[in-house]
Image (tube, rainbow, N blue to C red):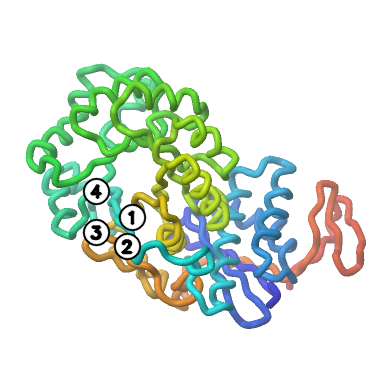
Amino acid sequence: MKITKVETIYVDEFWQMSWVRIHTDSGKIGLGETWYLPKSVSAVIHEIYAPSIIGKDPMDREDIWDKLFRLSGIFTYSGAELRALSAIDIALWDLVGQELDQPIYNLLGGKVRDKIKIYNTVGSYGKWQDNEFEKRDPVGFLQSLLDEGIDVVKAYYLNDYAQASGGNFISSKDIKQALEPLKKQRKALGDQIEIAHDGSGQWALAPAIKIGKAMDEYNIFWQEEMIHPLNAKSHLKLASEINSPVCAAERLMTRYEFREYIENGSAEIVMPDLIWTGGISETKKIATLADTYQTPIAPHDWTGPINVFACAHISMNCQNVMLQETNRAYYKGWYDKFIEPNIVIKEGYLLAPEGPGLGTKLKKSVFERPDVHVEVSTKAYEWEPVGFRDPNQKVRHFFSPNLPKDE
């Protein structure tokens, strides 16, 4: 099995979402996904990554990941480069699963569970206007989740207050006002539902500690990204000052950035985003590293449908997964537009995907949409810091405009 073509796909309606499809000479197609700046992701894939993997065997996932990571490391690996690599890695796992007729979790070592408990992050789409529902009726919103068997939720009580000071100051009065919805929810529902809080990385350390201490009386499930994950010692200080566990962080890229946070205990719950941090391969390694320190992981998701499928395979395989993030407005509102089948959630649990590989694929109708954008690469050449090398002719083109072109 050899890679023959790499496609990138995005649609204007969800302009931040990007899919990657990797075609092979066996006729099988692997599907991957990432989120944010799809034009940048496509540029990385078609300028550097796709030509580097055309003709390669998808079975050699570790070798491909390492070579692409080293390529991007020449000019810094994070950003669009790592998002592109994450999507490619997912697509390669999907291909290998299809070729071996096995779901990805079996290739990772098998299942430790058949379902994983979910939590709901607030979002809106179509008739599922949960952001507005929460603001209008915070108690009713949580009750609607409980009615579906979902008893863990993540909220953003302080986000609107960070902009005024750039996250450097918040008054006790503002904290009290911001937490009024939380106060109502706890009074009405008590401990029927767990409530996690996300600070979106907007606060400096001092106000983050102040907010965390004020929220401690409400038994917060975790405090996520109260400060931007730039300094593991600052996170450790936050963790030592508040009662709630500190969750970090979707903005940490690869095992190399997670390492210090896991080792010093500042990430009491580890939250890798699979489609940003390096794909299935890297998330498995992050989970194993966290498990070494008896630290649970909670895969991050607030994006597209392929991420949830990929996360599901990690969640079924890795013993130290605590929870899986999902968004009701997304999986009920728009995932069905793009994939078949959709994820299955019952009574607050995400069920293990069925079928080989990821267990889902893009619908044919995606390619018939008037707002779809597809770019294709079929030519192989090797990218080097000083130019490109044609693998067949063994000729190096130093910054040459005459690179191999796709028809």
Q: Which residue is mark 2?
A: 350
Name the amino acid, label 3.
Answer: Gly
Do the numbered discs 2 and 1 sit on residues whose CB atoms are within 8 Å? yes
Point out which mark residue 152 bears: 4
Residue under label 1, please give it: 326
As measured in the structure, the alpha-carbon distance from the residue carrying label 1 to the one carrying label 4 is 11 Å
Residue named by callout 3: 348
Q: Nearer the viewer, residue 47 or 299?
A: 299
Residues marked 1 and 4 touching at CB (< 8 Å): no
Looking at the rendered image, the quarter that the C terminus falls into is bottom right
**Mark closer to the chain start, 1 or 4:** 4
Q: CA distance from mark 1 to mark 3?
A: 10 Å
Query: Who's the residue at 65% across and 69% down the image?
Result: 59
Q: Amino acid at mark 2?
A: Leu
| Residue at the spot 47% in from the left edge and 40% down from the top edge | 293
Residue 355 to residue 313: above or below? below
Among all residues in the image, which is located at the extreme left? 188
Q: Amino acid at mark 4?
A: Val
